[in-house]
Image (cartoon, helix red, strand yellow):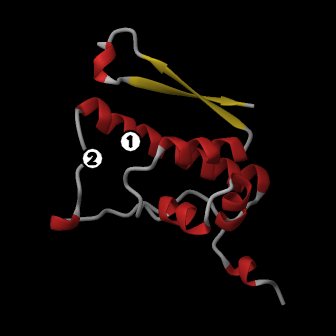
Amino acid sequence: MGSKHDRRPKMGKPKLKVVGGPAKREAPGTPEERRYFADLHKIIDAIFEEGASEFDWTWNQLAAHADLTYATVSNLGERITQFPRFQTVYKLAHAVGWKLITQMDPKQNKKASAAKVKVVAG
């Protein structure tokens, strides 16, 4: 008989859930900030795919390798967390051997906080 961790879902691509009605929150801030959160979710999807395809990890295993709680990884995978922290995404990327590099967009005013995120497979 397997452990209780074996019954947890495999990572795979996270299920996308649409939160409708008045409970749906729009991403805060400017269009650039909304794109930032959309980009973070794309990176999370890619990390989950990498964890599943390259390492055959469960969400629990990814959480352990990223030094995060299972609840954090599960909430990201189930799209409960709508506005993830960059530090969380950074830890997930590091767990699968990636590096995240941020850089300012030179076209933007420095006060506009328009940073781009680049993913580098390590």
Q: Which residue is mark 1?
A: 37
Q: Quadrant of the C terminus?
A: top right
Q: Position of residue 100 (x, y in %)?
A: 60, 31
For the residue carrying disc 1, how many other residues have a C-alpha within 10 Å: few (<14), some (14-19), or many (20+)?
some
Most extreme residue toward the front is 111
42 lies left or right of 100: left
Judging from the image, what secondary structure is the residue with disc 1 in? helix
Q: Which residue is mark 2?
A: 27
Judging from the image, what secondary structure is the residue with disc 2 in? loop
What residue appears at the point 61 percent right and 64 percent down from the top-left corner?
Answer: 69
The residues tagged by marks 2 and 1 sit, at their Cα atoms, a distance apart of 7 Å
Most extreme residue toward the bottom is 1
What residue appears at the point 61 percent right and 52 percent down from the top-left corner?
Answer: 48
Which amino acid, by three-letter code, is at mark 2? Ala
What residue appears at the point 59 percent right and 41 percent down from the top-left corner?
Answer: 90
Q: Position of residue 97 (x, y in %)?
A: 74, 39
What residue appears at the point 69 percent right and 58 percent down from the top-left corner?
Answer: 62
Q: Position of residue 75 (x, y in %)?
A: 48, 64
Q: Earlier in the sequence, mark 2 or mark 1?
A: 2
Whether pointer 2 and pointer 1 mark residues with C-beta atoms closer than 8 Å, the reply is yes
